[in-house]
Image (tube, grey):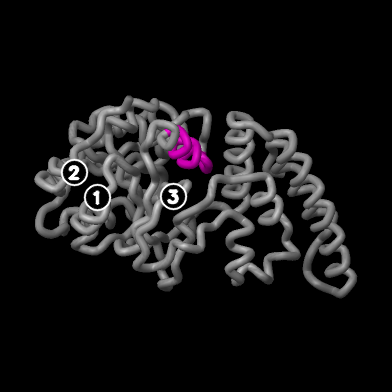
């Protein structure tokens, strides 16, 4: 049985009971901006801020009041977080993507929203830089969810609530709502450290994507829920600086690793390959109508993702 973190301790310690872990790779500028936001927290900054440099080609510079963990090899999001979590000494850890911006009361508000649920993983609402909400709360992924998402002819209907549910988004997760979810996007999550360590942290077989789903599924088995706290907000740029093709390759690879671990990998690959054939038919029609699309090129690219290739 996992140790239960006392809400009284959480309430008493507040930000002083929270460390922040930020994985870093690439340009240090976004991380430095986020650090400015964290230093400005009211009434007090988190007791410890840790940047986990994931063998970045541009190393994170020595920075006042920040502990930098330098990894020897690039292992991806989960590996970087695990390295940072090794030196956390507080009861709670706030894991933040480097491309976030947070307001001056963010930590205080997230602690307050999380306190009644402890021990639990708690995630805030995220918005893109234009103010549009992102889908933070999700249902555990199924082959059906991922196949519907893969079908590009349905993209025009993705503004509909029914289609959001069909691809695994939890449509109860709106601004102002505080609800349990199967899993929450890992760009910003508050974690109870003892429970995180008890389940082994992130599985480092995942490089990028689906590692947070796997973690939250294991936490759930040990009685630790995931909570969407829509009363707390942050701005998430969301991978705008990385190559879209590489991001999609990582996404598919992460989902395949998840399916291999939890079951259904063969069904997933078969279903997505069939969906790619549907996409090819739709793209062939668009091509005949003069649209700027290559049906064969797109099909080859999608099948390459399923085979673990980017080209």
Q: Main secondary structure of the magenta part?
A: helix
- Disc 1 secondary structure class: helix
Q: Which residue is mark 2?
A: 7
Label 1 sits on residue: 116
Q: Earlier in the sequence, mark 1 or mark 3?
A: 1
Residue 212 within the magenta-colored segment of the rendering: yes
Foreground pick, 302 / 122: 122
Q: Earlier in the sequence, mark 2 or mark 3?
A: 2
Q: Return the x and y of residue 16 as percentages of the image width and height.
A: 12, 44
Q: Are marks 1 and 2 in contact (CB under 8 Å)?
A: yes
Task: Say what secondary structure mark 3 lies in.
Answer: strand
Q: Position of residue 168 (x, y in %)?
A: 58, 54
Q: Residue at x 34, y 57 (%)?
A: 229
Q: Quadrant of residue 133?
A: bottom left
Marks 1 and 2 sit apart, C-alpha to C-alpha, by 7 Å
Q: Mark number for residue 40?
A: none
Name the residue tied to disc 3: 184
Does residue 293 show up magenta in the picture?
no
Q: Residue furthest right?
A: 288
Q: CA distance from mark 1 to mark 3?
A: 18 Å
Q: Nearer the viewer, residue 301 or 59?
A: 301
Quadrant, the N terminus: top left
Task: Specify start and end residues of the magenta stretch as a single range.
Answer: 208-218
For disc 2, the neighbor class at 10 Å (few under 14, some 14 to 19, many from 20) is some
């Amino acid at each position: 049985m996992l140790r239960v973190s006392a809400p009284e301790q959480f309430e008493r310690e507040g930000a002083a009971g929270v460390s922040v872990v930020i994985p870093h790779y690439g340009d240090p500028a976004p991380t430095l901006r986020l650090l400015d936001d964290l230093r400005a927290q009211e009434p007090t900054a988190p007791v410890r801020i840790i940047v986990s440099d994931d063998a970045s080609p541009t190393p994170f510079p020595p920075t006042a009041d920040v502990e930098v963990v330098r990894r020897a090899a690039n292992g991806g999001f989960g590996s970087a977080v695990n390295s940072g979590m090794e030196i956390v000494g507080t009861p709670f850890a706030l894991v933040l993507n480097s491309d976030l911006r947070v307001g001056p009361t963010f930590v205080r508000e997230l602690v307050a929203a999380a306190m009644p649920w402890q021990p639990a993983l708690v995630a805030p609402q995220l918005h893109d830089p234009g103010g549009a909400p992102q889908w933070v709360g999700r249902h555990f992924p199924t082959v059906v969810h991922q196949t519907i998402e893969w079908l590009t002819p349905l993209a025009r209907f993705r503004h509909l609530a029914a289609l959001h549910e069909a691809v695994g988004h939890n449509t109860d997760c709106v601004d102002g709502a505080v609800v349990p979810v199967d899993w929450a996007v890992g760009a910003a999550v508050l974690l109870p450290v003892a429970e995180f360590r008890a389940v082994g942290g992130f599985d480092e077989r995942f490089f990028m994507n689906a590692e947070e789903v796997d973690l939250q599924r294991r936490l759930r088995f040990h009685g630790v829920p995931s909570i969407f706290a829509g009363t707390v907000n942050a701005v998430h740029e969301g991978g705008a600086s990385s190559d879209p093709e590489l991001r999609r390759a990582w996404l598919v690879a992460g989902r395949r690793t998840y399916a291999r671990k939890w079951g259904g990998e063969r069904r997933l690959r078969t279903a997505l390959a069939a969906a790619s054939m549907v996409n090819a038919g739709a793209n062939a029609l668009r091509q005949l109508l003069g649209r700027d699309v290559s049906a064969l090129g797109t099909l080859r690219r999608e099948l390459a993702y399923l085979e673990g290739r980017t080209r």
